[in-house]
């Protein structure tokens, strides 16, 4: 029994790596053991099987942390049925193999424990007493730990793996069944909206926003870049800076959601991953809606097929009128060839081609293009850049960091930068009298950046892995619209608002109020403790701008205002 208790303590410490919430972890282990006592009737097997369960939760949480930067919570479990397992099998086969192997090993150990480890039976009366005490202890330690809010603050830290999962299990919001949405950062009292901001200019530029899959600025890690890459990440006559995002390693649609709605996907807790399905028809103030009200033609071009993750339905619901997917592009675009590499050289040419064709067909209306790339997604152990191309850039990256994964990342980045430079020149020369504002940003870092941190022996910085880049530039005489140079660090929830400001466009009451929050929230929107932000969310819910009701209601507030510009 002494050895078993020592083993249990070791497993708990290994899973927690901190005393911060150790009491909750121990209380949860005791509760698990007390529950198992009803089935195995002896302390030895109850404690050992509980320890195995802790090890399994820690293993799964550690895997998730390595690939997403966040620990496992109970609401992640339904994701196994939402298409993520096939994705991981294809993208990260070694990790999946390790998970399956580890799972089988733990099951075998648990079975062996149940069959071959046996101790004195515990009476039913004592079982009931211990279970009651364990329940009280678990609830008491959960309350003393600060509840769900305290674990939310350490979601991205490499510690408290087991207690974080248990806290999510005890959080009532994890189990509340509803057909609507709920925000975790919302106040009781609303925030009065600010007055609308008039336009700075009467001419409205075209706006192109490009989400660059898994692209980050290597200079965040102290790595050098060449001039063509530097001009892409921080254009000389543009505005650029660091961008804080909610995700790491994957889940690009969460960045898309934040940019277009001005909200953090993380605010919706367990629904963050499912917003493209559960959020359809529930968000009534978006960047596309605002631009449509100003007379813009809005278009999405996506590097995935139309059937992917309800993209078509969600983007229609937030105001993007024309949605073009890879299976919609006309010849000479070759879908099969594209899907072998997801090359930006192929996709951006097709996306900008559709955009320019639209301008030629209707030159009077300003246009908004949102382009979603997929070239630099991991893993980076596959060489997607064609042999003989960008070998110099690959060698440059290897000289600064001898790692084949980083060299592949940089070669893809260089191809994207060169492609964009060429297409930008073509767009400018074909429509010399047409002013265009262009926004580039990275949706999240690839998992590969963990290798960079390890090889460079960098000090731990949990916020760094949620940092990408943004750059805003203009074509055809629009530099007077921009405040050029290094800009402030931004959260992605503010990037759409900043784009409107830089374009000189009017801001409605909601966008004007959101713009005022930049000073209050700093570079992190969701992580900000700003009471003003929480009150703003209450206003959006009260006005029906965010529809959280279980039963959809007809949206009416502010709709007339947004439609008046059509």
Image (tube, helix red, strand yellow):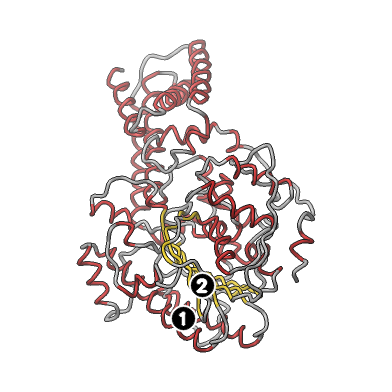
Find numbered disc 2 in the image and state the secondary structure of the residue it sits on: strand
Q: CA distance from mark 2 to mark 1?
A: 10 Å
Determine whether 74 is above or below 419 in the image: above
Within the image, what quadrant is residue 48 found in? top left
Horizontal side of 458 relative to 557 (left or right) equals: left
The residue tagged 2 is 438
Within the image, what quadrant is residue 270 found in? top right
Q: Could you tell me which residue is drawn at 31 percent across and 22 percent down? A: 4
Q: Could you tell me which residue is drawn at 32 percent across and 21 percent down? A: 5
How many other residues sit within 10 Å of disc 1, few (<14), some (14-19) or many (≥20)? some
Q: 79 or 518, which lies in front?
A: 518
Number of disc labels: 2
Find numbered disc 1 in the image and state the secondary structure of the residue it sits on: helix
The reply to whether discs 2 and 1 touch (Cβ–Cβ < 8 Å) is: yes
Q: 497 or 331, which lies in front?
A: 497
The residue tagged 1 is 424
What x and y, as percent, mark residue 154? 43, 38
Quadrant of the image containing the N terminus? top left
Determine whether 1 is above or below 405 in the image: above
Q: Could you tell me which residue is drawn at 55 percent across and 66 percent down? A: 502
Horizontal side of 320 relative to 226 (left or right) equals: right
Q: 385 or 503, which lies in front?
A: 503
What x and y, as percent, mark residue 400? 22, 64
Quadrant of the image containing the C terminus? bottom right
Determine whether 383 is above or below 117 in the image: below
Mark 2 or mark 1: whose residue is earlier in sequence: 1
What x and y, as percent, mark residue 131? 51, 18
For residue 190, the mark is: none
How many other residues sit within 10 Å of disc 2, few (<14), some (14-19) or many (≥20)? many
What x and y, as percent, mark residue 133? 50, 15
Q: Could you tell me which residue is drawn at 42 percent across and 58 percent down? A: 242
């Amino acid at each position: 029994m002494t050895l078993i208790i020592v083993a249990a303590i070791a497993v708990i410490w290994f899973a927690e790596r901190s005393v911060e919430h150790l009491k909750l972890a121990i209380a949860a282990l005791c509760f698990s053991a007390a529950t198992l006592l009803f089935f195995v009737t002896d302390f030895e097997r109850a404690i050992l099987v509980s320890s195995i369960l802790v090890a399994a939760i820690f293993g799964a949480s550690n895997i998730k942390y390595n690939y997403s930067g966040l620990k496992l919570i109970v609401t992640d479990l339904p994701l196994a049925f939402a298409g993520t397992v096939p994705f991981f099998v294809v993208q990260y086969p070694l990790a999946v193999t390790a998970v399956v192997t580890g799972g089988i090993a733990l099951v075998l150990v648990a079975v062996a424990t149940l069959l071959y480890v046996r101790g004195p039976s515990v009476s039913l009366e004592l079982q009931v007493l211990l279970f009651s005490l364990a329940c009280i202890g678990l609830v008491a330690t959960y309350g003393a730990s600060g509840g769900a809010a305290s674990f939310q603050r350490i979601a991205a830290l490499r510690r408290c793996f087991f207690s974080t999962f248990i806290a999510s299990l005890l959080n009532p919001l994890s189990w509340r069944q509803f057909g609507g949405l709920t925000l975790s950062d919302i106040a009781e009292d609303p925030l009065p909206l600010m007055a609308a901001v008039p336009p700075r200019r009467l001419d409205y530029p075209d706006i192109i926003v490009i989400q660059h899959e898994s692209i980050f600025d290597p200079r965040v890690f102290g790595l050098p870049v060449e001039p063509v890459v530097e001009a892409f990440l921080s254009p000389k006559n543009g505005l650029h800076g660091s961008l804080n995002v909610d995700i790491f390693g994957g889940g690009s649609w969460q960045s898309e959601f934040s940019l277009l709605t001005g909200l953090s996907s993380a605010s919706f807790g367990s629904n963050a991953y499912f917003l493209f399905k559960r959020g359809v028809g529930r968000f009534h103030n978006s960047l596309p809606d605002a631009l449509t009200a100003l007379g813009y033609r809005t278009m999405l071009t996506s590097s995935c097929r139309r059937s992917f993750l309800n993209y078509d339905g969600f983007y229609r619901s937030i105001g993007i009128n024309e949605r073009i997917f890879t299976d919609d592009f006309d010849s000479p675009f070759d879908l099969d060839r594209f899907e072998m590499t997801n090359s930006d050289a192929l996709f951006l040419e097709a996306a900008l081609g559709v955009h320019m064709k639209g301008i030629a067909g209707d030159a009077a209306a300003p246009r908004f293009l949102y382009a979603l790339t997929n070239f630099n997604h991991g893993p980076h152990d596959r060489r997607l850049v064609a042999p003989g191309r960008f070998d110099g850039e690959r060698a440059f990256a290897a000289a600064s960091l001898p790692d084949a994964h980083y060299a592949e990342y940089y070669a893809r980045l260089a191809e994207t930068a060169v492609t964009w430079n060429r297409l930008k020149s073509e767009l400018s020369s074909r429509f010399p009298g047409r002013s265009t504002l262009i926004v580039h940003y990275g949706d999240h870092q690839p998992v590969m950046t963990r290798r960079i941190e390890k090889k460079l022996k960098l000090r731990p910085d949990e916020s760094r892995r949620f940092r990408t880049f943004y750059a805003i530039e203009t074509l055809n005489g629009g530099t007077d619209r921009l405040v050029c140079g290094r800009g402030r660090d931004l959260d992605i929830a503010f990037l759409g608002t900043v784009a409107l400001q830089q374009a000189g466009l009017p801001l409605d009451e909601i966008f004007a109020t959101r713009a005022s929050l930049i000073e209050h929230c700093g570079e992190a929107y969701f992580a900000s403790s700003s009471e003003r932000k929480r009150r703003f969310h209450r206003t959006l819910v009260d006005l029906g701008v965010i529809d959280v009701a279980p039963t959809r209601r007809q949206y009416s507030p502010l709709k007339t205002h947004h439609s008046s510009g059509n």
